[in-house]
Image (spheres, helix red, strand yellow):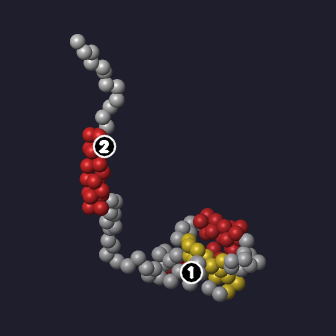
Amino acid sequence: MKKRRLMNNINVVPYIDVMLVLLVIFMVTAPMTNPGVVELPRVGQDLKQQNTPITVSVKKDGSLEMEGKKIKADALLIKLNQKLEKNPELSVVIAADKKTQYENVVTVMDLLKQNQIHKVGLLLKPEK
């Protein structure tokens, strides 16, 4: 009587065949899927500024100008509040010299926010 020996290796050829078939299926179907398309909401009106904003300039030395005229901080607040009482939709734009200290710009922004002027922005020059 002949004894049968146990086989101690695994035949992996069927597993490789299944993996290759799955790989081909995924490679064919992947370009067909549309990943993460976002449909943005539409608006009925332009988002452009309807009124021209009030421009407050901060010079290199920290001095303030409003619409081309030198002005002190307390007088600036009085004039801004008068203009905003007439038209509350107006916004304020801060145009600061690029060599002015950052602290000067933040001080003006803080002053405006403390006096309930919330529509404040910064004027920037776009690069070409």
- Which residue is disc 1 drawn over? 126
Q: Position of residue 68 (x, y in %)?
A: 65, 87
Tell whether 63 sits left or right of 22.
right
Q: Quarter-wise, where is residue 92 in the image?
A: bottom right
Image quadrant occupied by the N terminus:
top left
- For label 1, the crowd category at 10 Å Cα-Cα, with few meaning under 14, some 14 to 19 and many 20 or more, is few
Residue that appears at 34% across and 25% down: 8
Disc 2 vs disc 1: which is toward the camera? 2
The mark found on residue 93 in the picture is none
Residue 36: percent from left, percent from top: 34, 60
| Residue positioned 50% across, 83% down in the render | 52
In which quarter of the view is residue 44 placed? bottom left
Considering depth in this image, is 13 or 99 the residue closer to the camera? 13
Q: Quadrant of the C terminus?
A: bottom right
Q: Where 52 falls versus 19 (above or below)?
A: below
* Location of residue 77 in the rendering, given as x and y in whole percent from the top left corner: 63, 74
Mark 2 — residue? 16
Q: Secondary structure at mark 2?
A: helix
Q: Residue at x 26, y 61 (%)?
A: 32
Coordinates of residue 7 in the picture (x, y in percent): 31, 25
Q: Evaluate whether residue 111 shows in this view.
A: no
How many numbered discs?
A: 2
Q: Secondary structure at mark 1?
A: loop
Outermost residue to the top: 1
User: In the rendered structure, which amino acid carries the disc numbered 1?
Assistant: Pro
